[in-house]
Amino acid sequence: MKILVFAEQRENKFKKPAFEAVKTARSIADQLNAEVIALVVGGDVQSIAPSLGGYGAQKVLIAEDRRLAHYASRAYARLVADAAQAHHATIVLIPATAMGKDLAPRVAVKLDAGLASDCTALNVEGSEIVATRPIYAGKALTKLKVNSAAKVFTLRPNVFAAGESNGAAAPVEKISADLTEQDLSCVATEIKQSSARLDVSEADIIVTGGRGLKGPENFAMIEQLAEALGAAVGASRAVVDAGWRPHDEQVGQTGKTVSPSLYVAVAVSGAIQHLAGMSSSKYIVAINKDKDAPIFQVANYGIVGDAFEIIPALTAEVRRK
Amino acid sequence: MKLAVCINHVPDTATKINIAADGKAIDRTGVTYIIGPYDEFALEECLRLKEKNGGDVTAISLGGDTHKETLRKALAMGADKAVLLKDDSARDSFAVARALADYLKEISPDVVFFGKQSVDYDDGAVGVMVAEMLGLPSVSVCVKLEIANGKATAEREIEGGREVVETTLPAVFTAQKGLNEPRYPSLKGIMGAKSKPIEERPASIVAGKTELIKMEKPPAKPGGKIVGTDAGAVPELVRLLHEEAKVI
Ligand SMILES: Cc1cc2nc3c(=O)[nH]c(=O)nc-3n(C[C@H](O)[C@H](O)[C@H](O)COP(=O)(O)OP(=O)(O)OC[C@H]3O[C@@H](n4cnc5c(N)ncnc54)[C@H](O)[C@@H]3O)c2cc1C
Ligand SMILES: Nc1ncnc2c1ncn2[C@@H]1O[C@H](COP(=O)(O)O)[C@@H](O)[C@H]1O
């Protein structure tokens, strides 16, 4: 049995979710006595490919073409599906990133495979994989099996441990990209970087401000705390809709889903649609002057008090340490 | 320009979710249903494309009779035609996509819009699956779209920024918040929608490829600790984060 992992890279660097997916494949493979093959698609990825061996890939396939330097959904999907078929891989793991979530449905259709998306756990039970995934924005969980011969799973970033590389280098095998016109009918031409130093979807610590901060000027306080913690700045929908912060900072049902190690919610009430995006964070700190604010129900630690007094003190204390 | 939008009828995002006794579905008592919030952005975008380029908008929903409520709302907002693909059983994304694709193939629109995800099963898969089934290009999670000369330029949200994507038409798009601000149906629209017919057809049925084992509530978080009520609590909070949680 073989497991194929799509190891996402951007600008010839692996994203952490790529390592998480390879490591997860390794652990499933160890239980099912299977082999782990990784696939890297991009413009110039030869030099980074072997490093996936350190997370448990036994072989790394690379499909290189300068026209693949940016994401091209149809080309990428065809290359993943072709690689799975050529190597008889029946399990395909893909990170549930912006790229992976776009890619997986196409791969699933090409392989006539069922898809379990945005999984938060994959457990081997007997000879089967049981996936756990949140539904209703995390208000419920489902456990499910994929019944088709080929199976595609996408893994929620930051939930599966990547661990440290053991330093092993995997053998690399080039596959020809052979791009067709159809492959290139839909391609990314450019990336517009957001002005934020760090994006909430990639941050290990997030400090989010809510409407209780009263105005956009008061986010300076949040930015300072974030900087002291090496964190990204997040926002509730109320402050995004008010135009105080850009939409790409919004956390929640209609914003981004995040699972950082630490989530600090400042003057955020904790509406159910906000919780939808952040309740799987490992540790949650709430600072709110209303002791009955629902955010306290999911918080590990809370201070019931005035953010205008507490945040500067917290920033100073973090800097002091 | 022929435009189509697939809309789902989903529990209001503020609804409390309880699991039914069989552990395989939610308990529907007391749950109010709405048009999928992302599907509303998708519909709005189609209406704007029509206003700019001419053409007509078909809204499609797959499900039971209750979905007519959401189709009626689409008509009230300005859709020209509503189609209910009748199907009363719960199905996975693959089966939903197959049924929608079969219908879309018949009407072959220039632009097909979806929401980026349903707010029930949160799969975020149906739109792109349909694109693949129809052999069309797609751009998912769009926050901006421009169409001119038979080509589209879209911006999609990615980690740390936006990706600018160019695609030929016909194509499939999925909508993210930020794409537009959906309109409220006008009184005239609401009145007009009452007399517009909703076409009903049986959905094409294929078996799903996933099997639900069970649904459950997430484990409750152990009660948190209130560290204090003013800035005096800050050193203790920092100590806990450092020594107990080990996250800073
Ligand atoms: C379909 C749909 C989707 C949605 N999607 C999202 C989403 O993705 N993300 C999201 O966040 N919301 C979303 N919402 C909106 C959500 O329901 C809430 O309206 C929103 O989260 C509230 O934002 P808030 O907590 O900043 O503001 P509020 O609810 O107004 O809370 C402000 C909080 O600040 C506290 N406060 C005030 N002053 C101080 C002070 N000096 N010090 C400390 N605390 C103070 C108050 O006690 C209060 O708890 C969605 C809603 C709908 C209907
Ligand atoms: N039953 C349905 N009827 C019509 N459209 C649907 C249905 N289910 C899903 N969709 C569309 O597919 C999108 C993505 O759904 P999902 O893959 O389930 O998250 C939704 O936002 C809708 O646009």
Image (cartoon, rainbow, N blue to C red):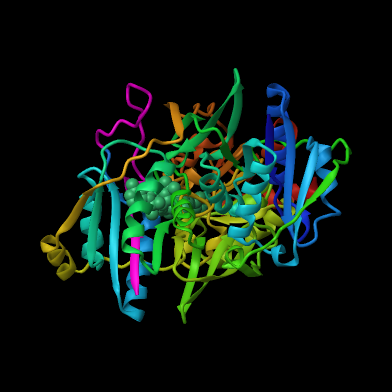
Q: Quadrant of the N terminus of chain B?
A: bottom left
Q: Is B24 part of what is drawn in magenta?
A: yes
- Quadrant of the image occupied by residue A60: top right
Q: Which residue occupies 55% across, 37% down?
A: A299
Image position of B72 (left or right of A31)? left
Q: Main secondary structure of the magenta part?
A: loop
Q: Residue furthest top?
A: A126
Q: Which residues are magenta?
A: B1-30
Image position of B64 (left or right of A172)? left
Q: Which residue occupies 59% across, 31% down?
A: A121
The answer to whether residue B228 is seen in the rendering is: no
Q: Is A274 part of what is drawn in magenta?
A: no
Q: Quadrant of the C terminus of chain B?
A: top right
Q: Residue furthest left?
A: B195
Q: Position of residue A31 (x, y in %)?
A: 69, 22
Q: Position of residue B86 (x, y in %)?
A: 24, 45
Q: Which residue occupies 72% across, 56% down?
A: A227
- In front: A163, or A240? A163
Say above or below: A158 vs B164: above
Image position of B67 (left or right of B45)? left
Q: Position of residue B213 (x, y in %)?
A: 45, 25
- Quadrant of the image occupied by residue B55: bottom left
Image position of A318 (left or right of B225)? right
Q: Position of residue A124 (x, y in %)?
A: 61, 23
Q: Which residue occupies 25% across, 66% down?
A: B79
The answer to whether residue A136 is seen in the rendering is: yes
| Numbered circles on residues, count | 0
Say above or below: A223 vs B232: below
